[in-house]
Image: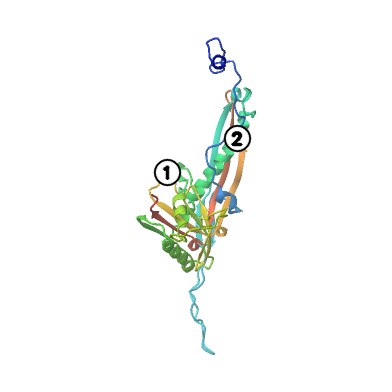
Amino acid sequence: MIKILNWLFLVTDEELRTYGDVSRKEDVLGLVEILTAKETYFLNNLGKTAAKDMVHITLTDSLRTAASAAVAEGGDYTMGAKTTPSRLTNVIQIIAIPFAVTRSQQQIQKHTGENELSRQTTKALMDWGNAAEFDLVRSTWASGVSGTTPKMSGILEAISLAQTYSAQTSGTAWSATILSAMMQDSYDDSNGDVATDIFLGSYLRNVMDTFTQKNQTTVYSDDVAKIRNATTTYSTSFGDLVVHNHRYLNQSGDTTGRALVLRPDKLKIAYLERPFIDNGLARSGDYDKRAVVGKLTIEIRNQTGHVFQDGFNIG
């Protein structure tokens, strides 16, 4: 019996095996997994308005400092100084993701079953969303004069006023005390529209989960289905904050962390032209050109209600 089993499991050179056989049909899943993360919170969630020029202006004004306005009976009025609106200016930024696909690429069969031009168009739409989100957050102003590429002031730059922006000493630990002070700044400096949301990179977001934890807490129950170790809403003396992660606040190469406290309903995206697929590009060879193009800027309303700090330790 043992000899028979040895014969059954014996491999000889006469046995034809699959490995190395180039004629076999490949087993390839007809699905392409996109490995790049998508981040479009502001692009999707901020209110939308229309721009009419390449320079987009928001008007602001202020009231007199609150004080007594009592007058004597029968006395003459004393006229006070009045103000006219101030301008907050931003420029329209043109965001484009161009690409070209050869006709041959479109004609050959693919495991996905998709036409490659269609697949690349879908990818370009996602790339456009990521690019727009990145600049809505991190873009720095460029006027566009003298042939330079115009760039809007993104949220970080546009809200960085003296009273609402401060740089911590590099390596400062992110803490509940600092967050409370930021909310106090939003209350003290704003018109009453206090910040409602906070945006953090992954490191500071993880640190924030420790703000309300207790040390040496033991759970004895045998049927605990979920242990919560996350802060999604943070309550302060000046209102509740919804906590968000955002990938573009901190990226590889940033040496310190950022904390951004906002009131999103006071931020708007002004479109001169909403994103579209431009398929009218000239072709001079065996390929098709396309581009996803959109023109937009960010409106910052109630500038002093938003608070931004950087310089935090990120490990």
Q: Position of residue 23 (x, y in %)?
A: 59, 15
For mark 2, what is the residue? 121
Residue 102: quadrant of the picture: top right
For mark 1, what is the residue? 252
User: Vertically, is 279 above or below 271?
Assistant: above
Locate residue 210 relative to residue 26 in the image: left or right. left
Locate residue 298 relative to residue 160 in the image: left or right. right
Looking at the rendered image, the disc whose residue lies closer to the viewer, 2 or 1, is 1
Residue 16: quadrant of the picture: top right
User: Vertically, is 95 above or below 157?
Assistant: above
**Upstream in the sequence, badge 2 or badge 1?**
2
Where disc 1 sits, the SS reads loop
| Nearer the observer, 203 or 312 | 203
Where disc 2 sits, the SS reads helix
Question: Residue placed at 47% from the left, 68% from the top?
Answer: 188
| Nearer the observer, 15 or 71 | 15
